[in-house]
Amino acid sequence: MATQKLYAGAKLREMRTRIGLTQKDFAAKLGVSLPYLNQMENNNRPVSTTVVLALAQEFGMDVTELSTGDSERLVSDMREALADPIFADAMPPTTDLRLTASNAPALAKAFLELHRSYRQTHERLASLDEALGREDARVRASPWDEVRDFFHYCDNYIDAVDRAAEAFAAQARDGMTIRDIAQRRLAEQGISVERADIEELRRYNPKTRVLHLSSRSAPQTQQFQMLLQVALLTQDKLLEATLDFARFHSDEARSIAKIGLANYYAGAALMPYAAFLGAAQDCRHDLEILSSHFGASIEQVAHRLSTLQRPGAKGIPFFFVRVDQAGTITKRHSATRLQFARFGGACPLWNVHRAFETPGRFLRQLAETPDGVRYISLARAISKPGGSYGAPVRRYAIALGCEIRHSEALVYADNLDVSNASAYEPIGISCRICERKNCHQRSVPPLERRLSINADERGVLPYQVN
């Protein structure tokens, strides 16, 4: 298999600007000519091995920053945005999208922001239509998309918050647990912690300075909620500074993001980066062992694995997703080339949907996306009981996976025939942008393809994709 050339002009320019060097000085440091550097920065030439080594040796850079992960995410997001019916037949070739993502990532992000603003405006009008009783009304927009995109483009890793949580967890010495440290920190703030028979998972009263945790919830949930409250009360300046950097467009989005950052802090404190990464590598990413060792739920462990993207100490690039019983994605993140639909549900051929049929069991799947990249995916159904008779039970399915080249580091790949091409199931992102012609689960035609309709023939679909 031919080695894929690395075009990373935008990243190279960003690195040079960050260091504060001119092109001439930067070229001298890298040991290349000025014209050669100029061609690399404009993606007219791939980044050479000599330059990659020089970046690591001269500047101590984590050369994985040059990877095309961001570009692939931008390409995927642009394709989905351009699948909006407003663009009709205006879908540019994928090569043009890749050039835009590589050479002008700021322009690509501006386009995505413009499309998102259009959707929000359109949905606000649709909500007005609904109020007026029109039948074709649509659902009102939510700031969730803006917050999810923030974490998405941060690779779901927030360095300052992660390191602060790791420092907090490092206080656990001489047999003290993370729960002991959390209670001590809250006590220092004059806050007492009490278990109570309440429906909410957590309820804090700033007047009485009492934090109530639901006695109906699992011990892992109680511990997590305590750590979340620690983040909100003791890390406010850090969280607010991070929010200032993000520049959200609405107070609602900022408020949601603050809760998201507090959740991030709680997970990072419960599973501190270096200790968790080492334990994950030692047990070959066995979720049940990690859950027991860190006192976390399976979902918390899976989510944490998808955040291990610290420069210089990266873990396996995982994707993580959670879907409800209707197939709607409620959580999503990918540090891999596999990207999820920003709107709607996931591919029905993916094993995450079958997990509901086998509660309490892990399902393994070898899958291949239309771009030829192969993955191993692990799925499991999870339930969140209400804690009392008659209380509603929330049911989800989670999936965690990575590219098959990392399979030796996963216990879940044992006994799978990863070298057998026929063992991989074809999956996609969403039907509107999936290129597969003969998918038996296709719900709508792909927008990039023309259709043929023959009234005298009927296959699985009432049309043929050209």
Image: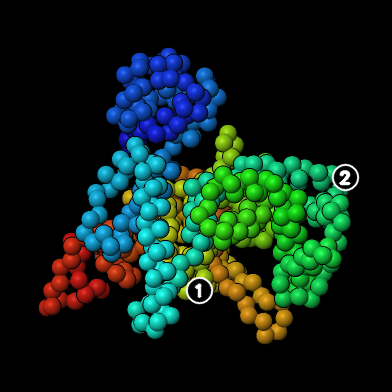
Left or right of 48, for residue 291: right
Label 1 and label 2: CA atoms lie apart by 44 Å
Q: Which color mode does the image show?
A: rainbow
Q: Amino acid at mark 1?
A: Gln
Q: Residue at x 62, y 72 (%)?
A: 383
Q: Position of residue 103 (x, y in %)?
A: 34, 37
Mark 1 — residue? 325
Pick the front one: 351 or 41: 41
**Picture layout, residue 424 above or below residue 44:** below
**Crowding at mark 2 (Cα within 10 Å: few <14, some 14-19, many 20+):** few
Left or right? Give the position of 403 relative to 82: right
- 39 lies left or right of 260: left
Identify which amino acid the numbered label 2 is placed on: Asp
> What label sits on residue 378 in the rendered view?
none
Q: Secondary structure at mark 2?
A: loop
- The reply to whether residue 424 is visible in this rendering is no
